[in-house]
Amino acid sequence: MASFGKLLRDLRTRANLSQRTLAQQVDITASYVSRIERGEREVGSHSLALQIAKILCLSPEETDLWLTNAGYISLRMEQLANEGV
């Protein structure tokens, strides 16, 4: 999980956001963001992972990587499943 935390930290700093700013925008605490980055917590839900991806302005490919690393199905796989492929 530490590598996932590093991914979050790298994406957050690339977006030039503090832990506090990111937390406020997705309605969680800065402490929670910090604990995710340190590998002590997981992203709590698929919807929260998507909210974070949106705030970080991730591309579709980055969003899929983000979701997969968070332990959720990627948007691409979800779309294929919904199409019955």
Image (cartoon, grey):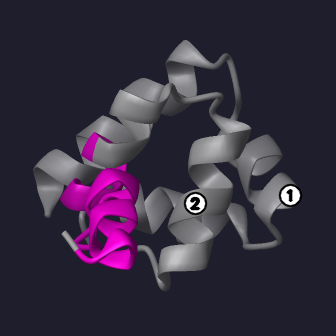
- Residue 67 spot, x, y in % from top left: 34, 58
Count of picture labels: 2
| Residue named by callout 2 | 50
Residue 83 visible at all: yes
**In the displayed structure image, the side of residue 48 where residue 74 appears, left or right:** left
Label 1 element class: helix
Q: Is residue 7 magenta?
A: no
Q: Nearer the viewer, residue 55 or 77?
A: 77
Left or right: 84 in relation to 21: left
Query: Which quarter of the picture shows residue 80?
Result: bottom left
Instruction: Give the amino acid type for the residue marked by disc 2 in the picture.
Output: Leu
- Quadrant containing the C terminus in the rendered view: bottom left
Which residue appears at 51% of the width and 64% of the height? Answer: 49
Query: Which contiguous range is marked in magenta?
Result: 65-84
Residue 72: image location, x then y, percent: 29, 73
The residue depicted at 26 percent of the width and 42 percent of the height is 65
Q: Main secondary structure of the magenta part?
A: helix
Residue 11: give x, y in percent of width and height.
Answer: 45, 28
In the picture shown, does residue 45 fall above or below 59?
A: below
Up-down relation of residue 30 to residue 66 (above or below) = below
Give me the residue at 34% from left, 30% from top.
61
The alpha-carbon separation of the residues under discs 2 and 1 comes to 15 Å
Q: Quadrant of residue 38?
A: bottom left
Quadrant for the N terminus, please: bottom left
Instruction: Tell me what residue is drawn at x 26 percent, y 39 percent.
Output: 6
Q: Residue furthest front?
A: 84
Q: Nearer the viewer, mark 2 or mark 1?
A: 2
Could you classify mark 1 by the number of other residues whose Cα lies within 10 Å: few (under 14), some (14-19), or many (20 or more)? few
Q: Mark 1 is on which residue type?
A: Gln
Question: Which numbered disc, 2 or 1, marks the residue that appears first in the sequence?
Answer: 1
In the picture of the structure, the residue carrying the numbered disc 1 is 24
